[in-house]
């Protein structure tokens, strides 16, 4: 039964390990995109311009309302169609294949950004207004207030929410299997369909996901303690 997990030609251990690495890389790349998008959307939501604010809330509503699986398919297939149409305008007809990793990263990053924008918005609003006013009284510019007062304290309020979103994102990487990206869930599915012990392979993948989430939880706890350093608890 355990031979299916051996490394080399006798088992699927190599493929499962490679899929786990792809899963971590996909999650890390997506969270980077998501944090950038989330900060931009949160800033737009706090904008004094009604048009900008409504557009930001509209973006959030779309990406929070449509299932992640469909968003991956829309971005992957939609980008291919758009590029073919663009090339066709210049009289060329050629097969265009969008990189699956890039498409999955962008899709999951946009979803993460939509959810994290609310976390960032709440974190920005949680920074005491008195400290911002003190910065203004000291002659700080808006830029200095943002980077020296708002941003450092915002992370302390945002980390718990971002940690939960990271754990969700780590599991959502399995949805990239729909476009045949060779991440952990996809490799486990292929091994289960072609091996002699499908249940063993699926359970092995499940255990790897549990290990990844447990390690992430430990890292997030350390990050939260670091962010709370120097904060007086009552």
Image (cartoon, rainbow, N blue to C red):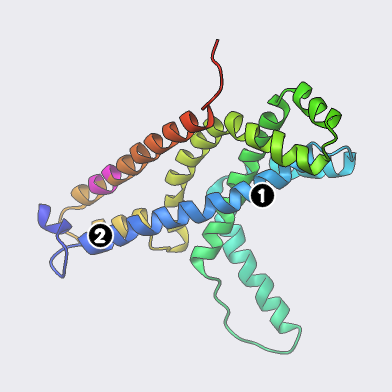
- In the image, residue 118 above or below residue 198: above
Q: Disc number at residue 37?
A: 1
Label 2 and label 1: CA atoms lie apart by: 36 Å
Work out whether residue 57 can be spotted: no
Please give the name of the residue rendered at 72% of the width and 78% of the height, measured from the top-left corner.
86
Q: Are marks 2 and 1 in contact (CB under 8 Å)?
A: no
How far across and down, in percent of the image, does residue 108 sit? 55, 51
Pick whichever, 191 or 112, lies toward us.
112
Pick whichever, 76 or 7, lies toward us.
7
Assign the magenta stretch its main secondary structure.
helix
Magenta residues (range)? 203-207
Question: Would you say 200 lies left or right of 16 here?
Answer: left
How far across and down, in percent of the image, does residue 137 sit? 85, 28
Question: Would you say 134 lies left or right of 114 here?
Answer: right
Say whether residue 17 is magenta.
Answer: no
Q: Earlier in the sequence, mark 2 or mark 1?
A: 1
Q: Report which residue position mark 2 lands on.
A: 191
């Amino acid at each position: 039964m355990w031979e299916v997990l051996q490394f080399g030609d006798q088992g699927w251990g190599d493929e499962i390990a490679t899929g786990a690495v792809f899963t971590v890389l996909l999650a890390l790349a997506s969270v980077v995109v998501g944090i950038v998008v989330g900060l931009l959307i949160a800033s737009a939501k706090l904008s004094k311009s009604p048009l900008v604010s409504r557009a930001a809330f509209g973006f959030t509503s779309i990406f929070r309302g449509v299932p992640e699986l469909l968003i991956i398919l829309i971005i992957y297939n939609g980008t291919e169609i758009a590029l073919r149409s663009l090339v066709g305008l210049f009289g060329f007809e050629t097969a265009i294949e969008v990189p699956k990793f890039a498409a999955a990263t962008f899709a999951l990053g946009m979803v993460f950004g939509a959810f994290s924008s609310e976390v960032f918005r709440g974190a920005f609003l949680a920074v005491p207004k008195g400290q911002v006013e003190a910065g203004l009284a000291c002659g700080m510019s808006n830029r200095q207030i943002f980077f020296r007062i708002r941003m450092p304290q915002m992370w302390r309020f945002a980390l718990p929410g971002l940690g939960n979103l990271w754990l969700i994102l780590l599991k959502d990487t399995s949805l990239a299997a729909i476009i045949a990206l060779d991440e952990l869930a996809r490799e486990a599915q292929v091994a289960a369909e072609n091996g002699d012990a499908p249940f063993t392979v699926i359970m092995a993948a499940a255990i790897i996901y549990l290990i990844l989430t447990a390690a992430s939880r430990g890292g997030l706890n350390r990050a939260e303690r670091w962010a709370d350093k120097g904060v007086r608890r009552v």
